[in-house]
Image (spheres, rainbow, N blue to C red):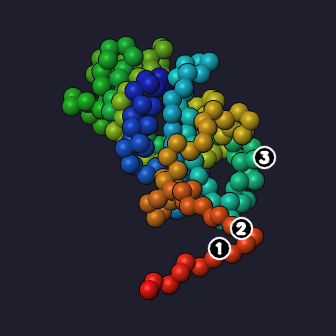
Amino acid sequence: GAVINPSVMTGMIAKLHGGDTIPLQLMHNRDVPVGRVIDAQMINGENGPQLNAMFYLNMKTDGALVEKLDSSVIGETSVSVVPSQILCSECGFDYMGISASLDNLWNCTCDQGHVIGQDGVHANLQGLQKWGELSLVDQGAVSGAKVLARSQQRMGQVSTPERLAARGFDDNVFTLTASATMPKPAPAPA
């Protein structure tokens, strides 16, 4: 029942746009990434702010995974994040703060005795320390965190395609112009 403050999402976008590489994982398996997150933006959804992310998968090497995404066998997402603050909804105690102990976190109990998950008490997540990964999963913890079909996608073209290029440049800037006739060679210097 935690509430994610929009500052977590803006922090995720800032990390990505600041140059952090965010791996795309399958079922939170951190052995080898299956792709990477290449862009993200926050939009206003029907239930408030939403983070939309665009990711890259290699069709040649991960065709079976792409088929599972297309058929919705794997159709949801999950993230691994560490917020800057985890606040008690009743008193504002910060589970990440200097006065918090491991016992507070382990028992989900603040120093005032409020227990997360009981009597309407919940955690308010604010800010972002780390965005570890985005995972493709069969069932995510948050309702609505889905891989969208092309017709439903809200993000347009890749805003920064150079993030895809391992060589550090945008491959789209190179073009080939072909014609049916050969140009005449330039005259040799005299």
- The image's mark for residue 81 is none
- Closest to the camera, between mark 1 and mark 2, is 1
**Identity of the amino acid at label 2?**
Ser
> The residue tagged with tag 1: helix, strand or loop?
loop
- Camera-nearest residue between 143 and 160: 160
Instruction: Give coordinates of residue 71: x percent, y percent.
Output: 78, 46
Badge 2 vs badge 3, beta-carbon distance below 8 Å:
no
Q: Residue at x 61, y 38 (%)?
A: 156
Q: Is residue 142 left or right of residue 23?
A: right
> What percent of the width, then of the height, locates residue 185?
59, 79
Kindly identify which numbered label has been placed on residue 179.
2
In the picture of the structure, the residue carrying the numbered disc 1 is 183
- Residue, disc 3: 71
Residue at (48%, 62%) from the top-left corner?
166
Of the residues shown, which amino acid type is indicated by label 3?
Answer: Ser
Is residue 3 among the parts visible in the rendering? yes
Q: Is residue 176 above or below residue 189?
A: above
Is 170 left, or right, of 75 in this rendering? left
Residue 30 visible from this viewpoint: no
The residue shown at (75%, 53%) is: 67
